[in-house]
Amino acid sequence: MVKKITSAVISTRELFFQVVLHCLVFSFYSFDRESPTIEAYQVVFFLNYTLATSVISYVLLPRFFYKKKYLAFIGFTLLMIMIVITTEELVLEKIYFPDSRGMAFPGLFFSLWQVMPVIAILSGFKFAWDALTKQREVEELRTMIQESELQFLKSQINPHFLFNNLNNLYAYAIENSPKTPDIILELSSVLRYMLYDCREKYVSLEKEIEQLRNFTRLSQMQIEERGRIDFTTHNILPGYQIAPLILTVFIENAFKHSQSAQSSNITIDIDIRLTDEGQLEFYCMNNYQLGNAVMENPGGIGLENVKRRLRLLYPGAHHLSIQHSKDTYEVHLSMQLQNTISYEMHHH
């Protein structure tokens, strides 16, 4: 649960920070080369400043400044400073220095010059602490929103995929095709992966490619003898991770476009390779017949979905190129993957 910045509750970390800060400021305030010992009056005078800054930091800042009531904040802050000066000049100095400093008021500007640096430093550090806390809360909130968005985008893929395959399964069942049981098995395997194995933000690259092979086999059953499907991989090294269901969208689109566009001579080429530096190169090409309605909006929701996920998960670490001519549609995606094995070795 995110705490509000106006909360009067002080965390243990902030309390420790304030104690250290006050000790440091007091050491500078009370340091005297000729008399390095700490005198009682120095502690009392500093406590006067501390009480004022506590009111400014923990009452006036949250109650007025953070609520954008700036005039009230300035007015009450000036009042607190005047109380500090009055207490120091009319009470404390008359107690500790009745025969010297307590006999006369040195003037408002001189008193401000004595009081303001200490109050400004102590209050300023409290403001900086709150600003850093607020920034951290904003980052946490942004992360939570991003995670929620990613989960939403990922959840959109399953119904989209299921809807397409149930339509195909229905057509095979109507025809009493002997391939229907095999399609059901492959479909359940793919769905199991989508629903249970890829709940994490990243999954093993090897596992994701195995899922892509299952997905391709499932889609290839629907093509039967109407074309050629090539699925090749190169240099898939262990330890690398990838965001799940990114590549699935492009392969699903390739099958959908080809099947919708033509009844024969379907060609789909899928090539996945990993460089020694961890750069994943994904290539997917499918042919189609010009003028088909499906290709007027290639990709649809699925493509926009995957583009959004790439921007969220691989900012500045991916390049997506989509080109289509009169009879071919090509996708080339480069992604910089992280090797968890080398990462752990580096940090241990």
Image (cartoon, rainbow, N blue to C red):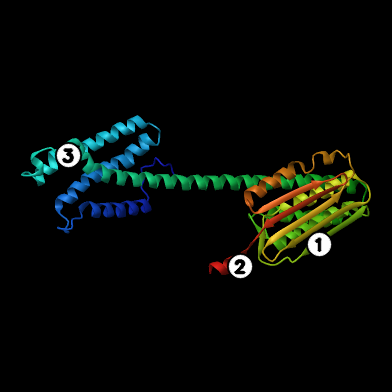
Residue behind mark 3: 87
CA gap between label 1 and label 3 equals 83 Å
Residue behind mark 1: 232
- Position of 79 compared to 190: left or right? left
Residue behind mark 2: 342
Q: Residues within 10 Å of mark 2 (few under 14, many from 20)?
A: few
* Label disc, if present, on residue 50 of the rendered structure: none
Residue type, mark 3 in image: Thr
The spot of residue 5 in percent (x, y) is 41, 42
The spot of residue 79 in percent (x, y) is 25, 33
Q: Earlier in the sequence, mark 2 or mark 1?
A: 1
The spot of residue 20 in percent (x, y) is 31, 55
Q: Secondary structure at mark 2?
A: helix
Residue 86 seen in render: yes
Q: Earlier in the sequence, mark 1 or mark 3?
A: 3
CA gap between label 2 and label 1 equals 26 Å
Q: Secondary structure at mark 3?
A: helix
